Amino acid sequence: MEVTIAELREKEISEAISVLYTSFGRPVPGSLMEEVKIWEILIRSTFGRYFTAKTEDNIIGICGLFFHENVCSIGYMGVLPEYRSRGIGTRLFDQVFNTAKDTGCETIILYASRLGKPIYLKYGFQGKYPATMYQLPNNIIALKSPTKSIHVSNDIPDWILEMDREAVGYDRKTYLTLKLEMGAKVLSIRNKAYGLLSGITGNKRIGPLISYNDKDALKIIHKAKTLGAVLCR
């Protein structure tokens, strides 16, 4: 079987998104129009680049590369189940990894799934922080403290940028700004906590969520739930 690795073309975005959903065992939504537009924004802004693994004219794997100044983030990686254990994921990741190095990124980061972790370890990546996706409960937890102090807006003030930089260790202004262009809402408690509410992956989620204490983080989650969030990361 001949497999080629190539950069994703805009006309292939819908197929690539379907492959990504299937790779993670999730049903493909009936309409992908919203997510296609989001990928188009990422590509046209040069913030994101995607690479595909193809056999003949069919996409069987996908991986994304995203740029935060001197830091590159790798994500959105998946290979269809029937094509796994053939070295396709390694070839795909190799292309993305070398592209990141060629663009001059000083640091390359990623979030590893259990399936992808063996590949990443081969390239010298070391685990630093665990990341968990949480399903929010159907019943909203009653809080003693009201959430009226939560400010909902369409802009990112400087204090949020500073807080985010302090938490993750690098500047994510471009990423956060693009999230707003994609329709995300900012939920915040001034100088204490903030979260982004978006529906980029089909379900409304709150994330990133950064807070100086658990109490304010819970307030943000509670507010996000009232606005339709079902996932938290």
Image (cartoon, helix red, strand yellow):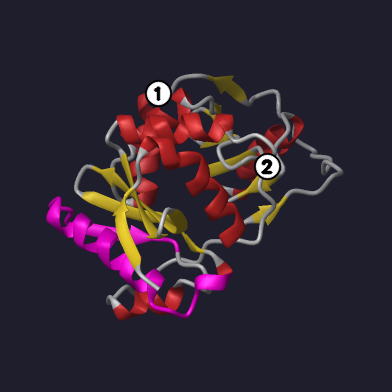
Asked whether residue 211 appears in the rendered view, the answer is no
Q: Residues within 10 Å of mark 2 (few under 14, many from 20)?
A: few
Task: Indicate yes or no whether the magenta region holds residue 16.
Answer: no
Q: Nearer the viewer, residue 146 or 64?
A: 64
Q: Is residue 63 left or right of residue 146?
A: left
- Residue type pointed to by label 1: Pro
| Image spot of residue 97 (x, y percent) | 26, 62
Can you say whether 94 is above or below 218 in the image?
A: below
How many numbered marks are there?
A: 2
User: Which residue is drawn at the image coordinates 45% and 55% (left, top)?
Assistant: 59
Residue at disc 1, secondary structure: loop
Q: What whole-number distance in Å separates the C-alpha atoms at marks 1 and 2?
A: 34 Å
Residue at disc 2, secondary structure: loop
| Image spot of residue 125 (x, y percent) | 32, 73
Residue 80 sits in quarter: bottom right
Identify the disc placed on residue 228.
Answer: none
Q: Nearer the viewer, residue 94 or 157?
A: 94
Task: Indicate yes or no whether the magenta region holds residue 88.
Answer: yes
Q: Nearer the viewer, mark 1 or mark 2?
A: 2
Q: Is residue 6 left or right of residue 187?
A: left
User: Which residue is drawn at the image coordinates 74% and 48% (left, top)?
Assistant: 136
Residue bearing the label numbered 1 = 157
Kindly check if marks 1 and 2 are in contact, taking CB atoms under 8 A apart as contact.
Answer: no
- Residue type pointed to by label 2: Pro
Q: Closer to the N terminus: mark 1 or mark 2?
A: 2
Q: Nearer the viewer, residue 28 or 125?
A: 28
Residue bearing the label numbered 2 = 29
Magenta span: 82-111
User: Which residue is drawn at the image coordinates 51% and 36% (left, top)?
Assistant: 192
